[in-house]
Image (spheres, helix red, strand yellow):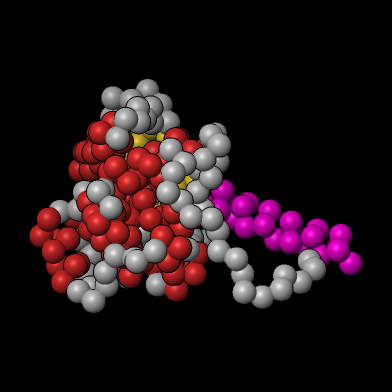
């Protein structure tokens, strides 16, 4: 029974991987650029997209340099149409980072309103920085002994996204979340608080980041400090 169950699960995961990998490319004319980094391949439609990618990449590299991390970007970054992404049921509404394949996909448009904000070029630019932050985080901890749960990857990426966000846009966002404050204890950053409301989680992460001295705190996290142990589940784990 166990083998059968595990084999079915493995087949399902393999099928999902094939679906994502087999997603068709956009029919637009494609160009390639590297933003001055040999390990980077930006696949873009026009100069505005390339400029957006290079500006975001520079912001992220400089941000991590301020914390003492020299990031050598190695990533393929593709701009994609949202309708193509939706047809293949991508889990993210704005883009995603595939760590094993060193690939970022960002969507040109979105049919959702994150934090209740109207979709705009400035909002899209912030999500581009979010995904590039994931790339940098993975470059630091991917092969190290530092172990960060998904919620801490998201904590850092959201903190950086909001920190680098256009000031007017950030003020508009925060005005919608005046009742959301920093967490009192780091154990409040966990898979449940992230899963229940990622947008509120992002604001709480940013306010916690500010309360804990910003980049200094992120640097400590990435060096293996200050991360609380995983939550202990309040119920008995069943076999299988």
**Location of residue 222 (image quadrant):** top left
Q: Quadrant of the N terminus?
A: bottom right
The answer to which of 81 and 36 lies nearer the viewer is 36
- Report whether 159 appears left or right of 196: left
Q: Quadrant of the C terminus?
A: bottom right
Task: Look at 39% across and 64% down and name the residue there.
Answer: 185
Q: Position of residue 118 (x, y in %)?
A: 20, 69
Secondary structure mainly formed by the magenta segment: helix
Judge whether residue 24 can be spotted in this image.
no
Q: Position of residue 174 (x, y in %)?
A: 19, 67
Task: Look at 47% across and 41% down and name the residue there.
Answer: 224
Look at the image and say whether residue 76 sits in the magenta stretch.
no
Task: Look at 26% across and 69% down and name the residue there.
Answer: 181
Q: Position of residue 158 (x, y in %)?
A: 33, 55
Q: Farthest residue to the right: give it.
A: 1
The stretch of residues the image draws in magenta is: 1-24
Task: Look at 70% across and 61% down and name the residue there.
Answer: 12
> On screen, 8 above or below 146?
below
**Location of residue 137 (image quadrant):** top left
- Report whether 112 appears left or right of 223: left
The answer to which of 9 and 140 lies nearer the viewer is 140
The answer to which of 59 and 33 lies nearer the viewer is 59
Q: Position of residue 221 (x, y in %)?
A: 41, 45
The answer to which of 49 and 234 lies nearer the viewer is 234
């Amino acid at each position: 029974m166990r083998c059968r169950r595990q084999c079915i699960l493995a087949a399902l995961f393999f099928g999902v991987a094939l679906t994502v990998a087999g997603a068709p490319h956009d029919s637009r004319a494609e160009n390639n650029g590297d933003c001055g980094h040999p390990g980077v391949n930006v696949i873009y439609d026009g100069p505005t997209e390339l400029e957006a990618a290079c500006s975001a990449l520079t912001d992220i590299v400089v941000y991590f340099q301020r914390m003492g991390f020299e990031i050598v970007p190695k990533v393929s970054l593709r701009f994609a149409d949202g309708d193509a992404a939706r047809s293949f049921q991508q889990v993210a509404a704005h883009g995603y980072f595939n760590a094993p394949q060193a690939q970022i996909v960002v969507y040109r448009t979105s049919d959702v309103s994150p934090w209740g904000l109207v979709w705009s070029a400035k909002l899209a630019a912030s999500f581009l920085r979010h995904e590039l932050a994931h790339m940098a985080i993975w470059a630091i901890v991917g092969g190290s002994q530092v172990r960060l749960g998904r919620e801490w990857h998201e904590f850092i990426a959201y903190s950086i996204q909001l920190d680098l966000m256009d000031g007017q846009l950030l003020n508009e966002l925060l005005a919608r979340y005046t009742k959301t404050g920093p967490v009192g204890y780091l154990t409040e950053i966990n898979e449940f608080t992230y899963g229940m409301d990622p947008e509120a989680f992002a604001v709480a992460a940013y306010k916690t980041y500010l309360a804990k001295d910003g980049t200094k705190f992120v640097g400590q996290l990435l060096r293996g400090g200050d991360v609380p142990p995983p939550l202990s589940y309040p119920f008995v784990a069943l076999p299988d």
